[in-house]
Image: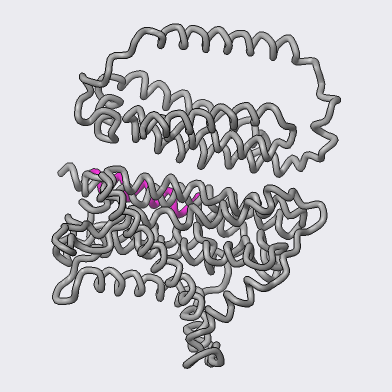
């Protein structure tokens, strides 16, 4: 049962992820990306990380992708805008980033090839809201606070750039 | 295992049927109550005092011709009503609508899923409900629809934050996200969270009205400016799906408010399920009452209200609650 769900959701996630980049309609791309995120959330639940799964849906699928949609709709792209004449200026940069991502993926796959320990040493609160919260505010307090500072700086930057005349 | 699956399926079928029937007769109740408040009679032809009006509406919707506008994004246009309908039906799975009962010698929990992160699940599903509206607005290739869709996505993003924040106070006090446990903690009337979190309740209700696109926040479908907003171009049962989705969202809001703030199924003398229904119906009535009483906001007022009033108030509410809880 669990294996069947895993195979099904993985397939959905991979196919949807491919469709994000393989077809040209940006709105459809967003919808496929949302599908990928929801499938990933189910995979997270199977990994006993329910809190991460729900955050994945709330933050990525429910908030960030809606903003993407919003921007795409406001830009009002026509069909010819995403035709063949895409500017190729950024091609070298794109290839470099893709290489970095590819290497990173290979490293992660290589690391996960070690036979995994079955979840014997999982505590009762593993992956729950209480467990994750406690870890965030004790063991990982400094990284957590640094991340929030980073987010505030990013927001401030956006406000400064958008409201120059204010 | 098999027995568990069977019982869950039966519970789900019963609950969804009741939910759909409630949605259908909500339309009747709304028209009747609005009519009464405006000194009219309301629907009174189909059946006794018009009680069969929803059936007549359904039959009419089913037999209408379905028109797809030229230049519409066909696949997304056909998918959008489902994207609006399905998230509206899901949250009811987490709502406990009664105590344990014993039926045929088995103990049955009157909730479809007793899940530890139930509250978060409801918020997650609610955050997905915006897609149906945005897709409907964009794919129809109509300016009214597009404007309605844009308005609604901005409105729903803004007020979603308010909903989440208004509920944090309860989570702080209850110390759990499990809706069954939250109801269990409200076993006497003065322990209801509406008395311990009055500001939280007000904020939740205001945000929920905005989130379900109801008056006075029904700007995505403001008739005088946008015809019918994001579902202007829809016809036949796909239009009906948007309609049922909206009412299902209202029922969800009412049941969530009942569960979190009004003590759920708890109450003296009457059976628990009846208490739950009474409370939920009372919340739904207030919904309709507000629609009959208040004029529509202007769009900039709506956004300002969301960001300058609701969210600071919700933050202050969280801080005060946390302080009191600490002391």
Image mark count: 0
Quick check: B101 above or below B326?
Answer: below
Residue at the spot 34% in from the left edge and 30% down from the top edge: A49
Quick check: B255 above or below B126?
Answer: below
Front-lying residue, B310 or A57? A57
Q: Is the C terminus of chain B in the top left, top right, bottom left or bottom right quadrant?
A: top left
Residue at the spot 69% in from the left edge and 14% down from the top edge: A94
Report the colour scheme: one colour
- Tell me if A118 is positioned left or right of B69 in this view: left
Q: Answer yes or no: is residue B146 visible.
A: yes
Quick check: B254 above or below A14?
Answer: below
- Tell me if B184 is positioned left or right of B282 in this view: left
B311 falls in the magenta region: yes
- Tell me if B205 is positioned left or right of B43 in this view: left
Front-lying residue, A13 or A86? A13
The stretch of residues the image draws in magenta is B307-322
Q: Is the N terminus of chain B in the top left, top right, bottom left or bottom right quadrant?
A: top left
Instruction: Single out the residue that lies furthest toward the front.
Output: B2
In the rendered image, residue B5, in percent from the top left (x then y), is placed at 30, 49
Residue A42, by quadrant, is top left
Q: Main secondary structure of the magenta part?
A: helix
Residue at the spot 34% in from the left edge and 69% down from the top edge: B280
Q: Answer yes or no: is residue B260 visible.
A: no
Quick check: A127 above or below B78?
Answer: above
In the rendered image, residue B241, in percent from the top left (x then y), is placed at 57, 63
In the rendered image, residue A27, in percent from the top left (x then y), is placed at 68, 40
B35 falls in the magenta region: no
- Tell me if B203 is positioned left or right of B264 in this view: right
Residue B99, by quadrant, is bottom left
In the rendered image, residue A141, in percent from the top left (x then y), is placed at 30, 22
Residue at the spot 72% in from the left edge and 65% down from the top edge: B66
């Amino acid at each position: 049962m669990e294996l069947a769900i895993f195979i099904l959701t993985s397939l959905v996630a991979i196919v949807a992820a491919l469709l994000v980049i393989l077809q040209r309609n940006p709105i459809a791309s967003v919808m496929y990306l949302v599908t990928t995120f929801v499938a990933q959330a189910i995979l997270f639940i199977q990994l006993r990380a329910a809190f991460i799964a729900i955050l994945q849906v709330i933050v990525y699928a429910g908030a960030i992708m809606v903003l993407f949609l919003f921007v795409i709709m406001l830009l009002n792209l026509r069909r010819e805008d995403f035709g063949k004449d895409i500017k190729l200026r950024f091609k070298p940069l794109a290839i470099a980033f893709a290489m970095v991502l590819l290497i990173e993926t290979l490293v992660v796959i290589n690391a996960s090839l070690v036979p995994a320990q079955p979840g014997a040493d999982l505590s009762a609160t593993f992956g729950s809201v209480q467990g994750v919260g406690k870890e965030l505010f004790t063991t990982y307090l400094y990284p957590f606070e640094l991340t929030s500072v980073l987010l505030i700086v990013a927001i401030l930057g956006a406000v400064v750039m958008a409201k120059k005349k204010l | 295992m098999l027995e568990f699956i069977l019982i869950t399926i039966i519970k789900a079928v019963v609950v969804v049927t009741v939910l759909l029937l409630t949605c259908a007769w909500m339309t009747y109740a709304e028209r009747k109550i609005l009519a009464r408040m405006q000194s009219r009679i309301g629907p009174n032809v189909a059946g006794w005092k018009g009680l069969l009006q929803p059936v007549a509406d359904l039959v009419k919707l089913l037999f209408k011709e379905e028109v797809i506008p030229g230049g519409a994004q066909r696949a997304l246009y056909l998918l959008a009503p489902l994207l609006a309908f399905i998230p509206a039906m899901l949250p009811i799975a987490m709502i406990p609508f009664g105590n344990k009962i014993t039926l045929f010698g088995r103990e049955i929990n009157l909730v479809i899923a007793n899940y530890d992160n139930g509250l978060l699940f409801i918020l997650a599903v609610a955050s997905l409900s915006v897609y149906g509206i945005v897709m409907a607005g964009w794919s129809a290739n109509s300016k009214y629809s597009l404007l309605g869709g844009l308005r609604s996505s901005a409105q729903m993003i803004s007020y979603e934050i308010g909903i989440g924040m208004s509920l944090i106070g309860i989570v702080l006090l209850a110390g759990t996200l499990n809706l069954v446990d939250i109801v269990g903690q409200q076993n006497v009337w003065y322990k209801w969270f509406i008395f311990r979190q009055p500001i939280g309740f007000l904020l939740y209700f205001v945000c929920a009205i905005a989130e379900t696109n109801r008056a006075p926040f029904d700007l995505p479908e403001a008739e005088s400016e946008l015809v019918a907003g994001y579902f202007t171009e829809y016809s036949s049962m796909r239009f009906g799906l948007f309609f049922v989705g909206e009412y299902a969202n209202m029922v969800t809001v009412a049941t969530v408010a009942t569960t979190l703030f009004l003590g759920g199924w708890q109450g003296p003398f009457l059976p628990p399920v009846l208490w739950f229904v009474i409370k939920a119906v009372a919340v739904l009535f207030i919904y309709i009452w507000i629609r009959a009483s208040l004029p529509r906001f202007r769009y900039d007022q709506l956004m300002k209200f969301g960001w300058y009033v609701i969210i600071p108030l919700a933050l202050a509410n969280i801080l005060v609650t946390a302080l009191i809880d600490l002391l």
